[in-house]
Amino acid sequence: MGKGREDGPLSTSSAYAVLGVQPDCSPVEIKAAFRAKVKQFHPDVNRDENSDAMIRRVIQAYQILSSYTPSQIIETECLDPFDRPECEAFDVFVNELLCVGKACSSSCVERAPHAFRFDSSTGTARAFSQGQEEDYQVQCAVGQCPRSCIHYVTPSQRILLEELLHSILDVPYDTSAEADLLFSLITKAKFENNRYQKPKKKTKSSTQHVDWF
């Protein structure tokens, strides 16, 4: 599901370090630090290849220090690119709750092996390469998925959907509420992404005097 999981779970002391706050700081300071870090590593602002991993660590750190679940973070912390997409939806996200993995008759892994692969722990397909918006094989994989479980999303939407999906797959007990939220966010993303319009470029007004006569 991307980089960042390979480093293992954060400790409480590491969580404070990720957010850049002291252990004796207040909840208000933790929230402010979290929002500042989200802005710093936002995919639309930070084009560094490690920005994905960093924003995941920021979310994990805030989960630890606030005791919020990923769904609560999305709902309470104004982390909602689903209302206002930050850019065009060119990243791909696989809803692994619907994916049947190698049993699929029209596997995305076979159609576009450079963009999808089967996860060893779940057996489901997962996108591991982004920035393939012009790739015909990826377009076919998305459009011809028999379970309709591959979606074009924005970078911010993808990160939050992946975090929410990961929390569902990792927890052995009932996660129906989180699953419902995942499906609703995907639906919302599809609707808003279809409405997205690129910001119009401002025309430069000339300050030079023009004598028309």
Image (tube, rainbow, N blue to C red):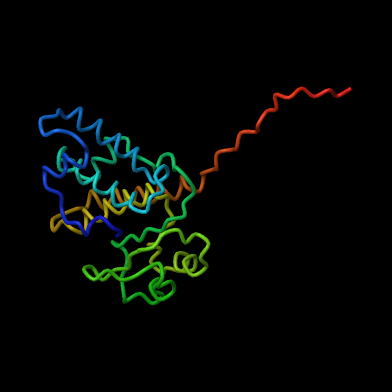
The quarter holding residue 207 reads: top right
Frontmost residue, 210 versus 98: 210
Frontmost residue, 89 versus 50: 50
Which residue: 51% across, 44% down?
196
The quarter holding residue 105 reads: bottom left
Which residue: 39% across, 42% down?
81
User: Image height check: is 209 above or below 159?
Assistant: above
Q: How many marks?
A: 0
Q: Which residue is outermost to the right?
A: 213
Which residue: 23% across, 48% down?
177
Frontmost residue, 200 versus 182: 200
Residue 87: x percent and y percent? 47, 45
Q: Is residue 154 left or right of residue 210?
A: left
User: Image height check: is 95 above or below 30?
Assistant: below
Residue 57: x percent and y percent? 24, 48
Residue 28: x percent and y percent? 20, 27
Query: Which quadrant would the C terminus be assigned to in this image?
Result: top right
Q: Which residue is outermost to the front?
A: 208
